[in-house]
């Protein structure tokens, strides 16, 4: 499984024991490379080749006799989503073609190389965390043979902070027995290992760590331009520590417009002032 995030791509090679009633996790190989696929805008072939270092590791760890029946999938996240359909589509096509032509694994037939929907991104993280913590099990496990309906056991909530988006997913519990989660985009009906779960999920596109930081820089620069009329070598940024400076990229109205500005904490580095900037970026007043 290749997790193609906004800041980098990661490969997970999982080994499961399938001798029991449900697969049992044995071990995982993990490796990461930077930058992410979204950094190769307009260069789909380069994007595809950037995954070679990950796939070469998979070739080393998967026994030769099992390679042809070992499925591989690439799931991209919000970084590619923000590129737009044309550029992201070209990158995904190049990735799929290279996997099929260069490597011995079986590319997953349905949705093998795709951009994940935001709601799936969070739910997959919820499944992973709760599976590894033994909070969710198959319908055939001793603790869950009495009912095939929605889970009543305790599961863990997941807060997934990515580079370009952030997700929250949890299994709600209600004080009244007849209460249930109302239908809508936030409701996710999940069937995992023969059991049914009703989850709350929400994905906030643009509120990942790196994307939100860019929004803060853009707002600070805009506020400074109103005060000074656009002049000044160093822009005061209360979210930087006092006495520090850094060069940041500010995106213009069109994505191709990028300018570098110097920001400094100077004497105004302040938690309260920085918190107010972030509240504006998050539209907390709304």
Image (cartoon, rainbow, N blue to C red):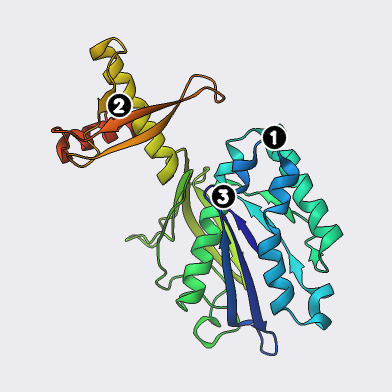
| Residue identifier under label 1 | 42
Q: Earlier in the sequence, mark 3 or mark 2?
A: 3
Which numbered marker is on residue 148? none
Asked if disc 1 and disc 3 are in contact, CB closer than 8 Å, the reply is no
Across and down, in percent, residue 143 comes to: 49, 84
Q: Earlier in the sequence, mark 1 or mark 2?
A: 1
The secondary element bearing badge 1 is classed as: loop
Left or right of 80 on screen, residue 236: left
Q: Is residue 217 above or below residue 176?
A: above
Disc 1 crowd rating (10 Å Cα; few below 14, some 14-19, many 20+) is: some
Q: Residue at x 54, y 76 (%)?
A: 147
Q: Can you say which quadrant of the picture contains the N terminus?
A: bottom right
| Residue identifier under label 2 | 220
| Real-space Cα separation, disc 3 to disc 2, in angstroms | 26 Å
Across and down, in percent, residue 93 comes to: 78, 45
Residue at the limit of the structure toward the right, as seen here = 101
The secondary element bearing badge 2 is classed as: helix
| Real-space Cα separation, disc 1 to disc 3, in angstroms | 15 Å
Residue at the limit of the structure toward the left, as seen here = 267
Displayed quadrant of residue 264: top left
Asked if disc 3 and disc 2 are in contact, CB closer than 8 Å, the reply is no
Asked if disc 1 and disc 2 are in contact, CB closer than 8 Å, the reply is no
Q: Can you say which quadrant of the picture contains the C terminus?
A: top left
Q: Residue at x 55, y 46 (%)?
A: 118
| Residue identifier under label 3 | 35
Left or right of 69 on screen, residue 17: left
Disc 3 crowd rating (10 Å Cα; few below 14, some 14-19, many 20+) is: some
Q: Nearer the viewer, residue 219 or 193?
A: 219
Residue at the limit of the structure toward the top, as seen here = 229
């Amino acid at each position: 499984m290749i997790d193609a995030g906004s800041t980098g791509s990661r490969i997970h090679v999982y080994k499961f024991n399938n001798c029991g009633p449900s697969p049992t996790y044995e071990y995982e190989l993990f490796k990461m490379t930077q930058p992410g696929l979204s950094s190769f805008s307009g260069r789909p072939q380069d994007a595809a080749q950037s995954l070679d270092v990950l796939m070469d590791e998979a070739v080393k760890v998967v026994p030769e006799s099992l390679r042809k029946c070992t499925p591989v999938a690439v799931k991209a996240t919000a970084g590619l989503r923000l590129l737009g359909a044309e550029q992201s589509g070209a990158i995904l096509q190049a990735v799929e073609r290279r996997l099929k032509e260069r490597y011995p694994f079986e590319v997953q037939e349905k949705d093998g190389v795709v951009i994940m929907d935001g709601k799936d991104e969070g739910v997959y993280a919820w499944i992973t965390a709760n599976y590894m913590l033994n909070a969710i099990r198959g319908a055939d496990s001793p603790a869950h043979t009495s009912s095939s309906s929605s889970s009543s056991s305790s599961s863990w909530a997941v807060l997934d902070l990515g580079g370009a988006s952030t997700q929250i997913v949890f299994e709600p519990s209600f004080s009244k027995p007849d209460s249930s989660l109302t239908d809508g985009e936030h409701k996710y009906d999940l069937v995992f290992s023969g059991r049914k779960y009703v989850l709350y999920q929400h994905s906030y596109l643009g509120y990942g760590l790196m994307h939100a930081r860019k929004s803060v820089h853009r707002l600070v620069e805009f506020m400074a331009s109103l005060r000074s009329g656009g002049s000044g070598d160093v822009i005061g940024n209360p979210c930087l520590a006092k006495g520090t400076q850094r060069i940041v990229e500010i995106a213009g109205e069109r994505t191709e417009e990028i300018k570098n500005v110097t920001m400094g904490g100077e004497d105004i580095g302040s938690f309260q002032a920085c918190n107010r900037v972030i509240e504006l970026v998050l539209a907390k007043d709304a």
